[in-house]
Amino acid sequence: MNPQDRKIIAMKEKLSILGRCVLKYTDEYGTEFFVDGEMIVDSKYDYVMWKDSIMYWKDYIQHSNPQNVEYKEYFDSKSGTYQGQISYKNDFNSNLSNTKKQEIAERIRILSVRNNFKLEIL
């Protein structure tokens, strides 16, 4: 691979923050990944991400599809309030190895440092 080709590939790698708790990481080959986390107000970090949440973006879309989400409400007599519970009918596990998740987390860390975005990985 000549150096010019590497530059083109590197330009495809991208990290996007969607909403207040979702990261979308696109690797150098254009593969998209979902990463769950939370924005935090802390002098040390801006965002915390959960490495175990990393999955293929397409699996995240299927997982969060309204037809896959089930909401049940029930009355809790002990507290005297209605409670809601969200569950998923199907689990879309991306089957990413822990090694691959760690590799993606490290790439995200590198991209965040370049953009002065302080990230904690849990």
Image (tube, grey):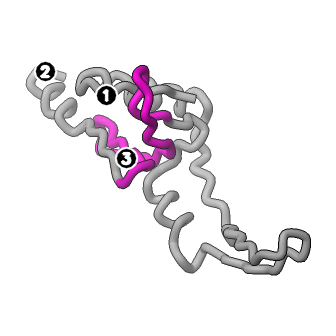
Q: According to the image, label 3 marks what residue?
A: 24
- Bounds of the magenta span? 19-48
Mark 2 → mark 3, Cα distance in angstroms: 29 Å
Q: Do the residues labelled 1 and 2 touch (CB within 8 Å)?
A: no
The residue identified by callout 1 is 117
- Near mark 2 (Cα within 10 A), the count class, few <14, some 14-19 or many ≥20, is few
Residue at the extreme left:
4
Query: Compared to 66, does 6 lie above or below?
Result: above
| Outermost residue, right side | 78
Residue 12 image offset from top left, x and y in percent: 21, 39
Residue at 53% x, 66% y is: 64
Between marks 1 and 2, how big is the CA–CA gap? 31 Å
Image quadrant containing the N terminus: top left
- Name the image quarter holding residue 98: top right
Given this view, does label 2 or label 3 mark the residue nearer the observer? 3
Residue 20 left/right relative to 120: left
Q: Do the residues labelled 2 and 3 touch (CB within 8 Å)?
A: no
Please tell me which residue is depicted at 67% across the width and 77% down the height of the picture: 71
Q: What element carries label 3?
A: strand
Residue 44 image offset from top left, x and y in percent = 42, 20
In this rendering, the answer to whether 118 lies above or below 74 is: above
The disc labelled 3 sits on which kind of residue? Answer: Lys
Q: Cβ–Cβ below 8 Å for labels 3 and 1?
A: no
Q: Mark 2 points at which residue?
A: 2
At label 1, the amino acid type is Phe
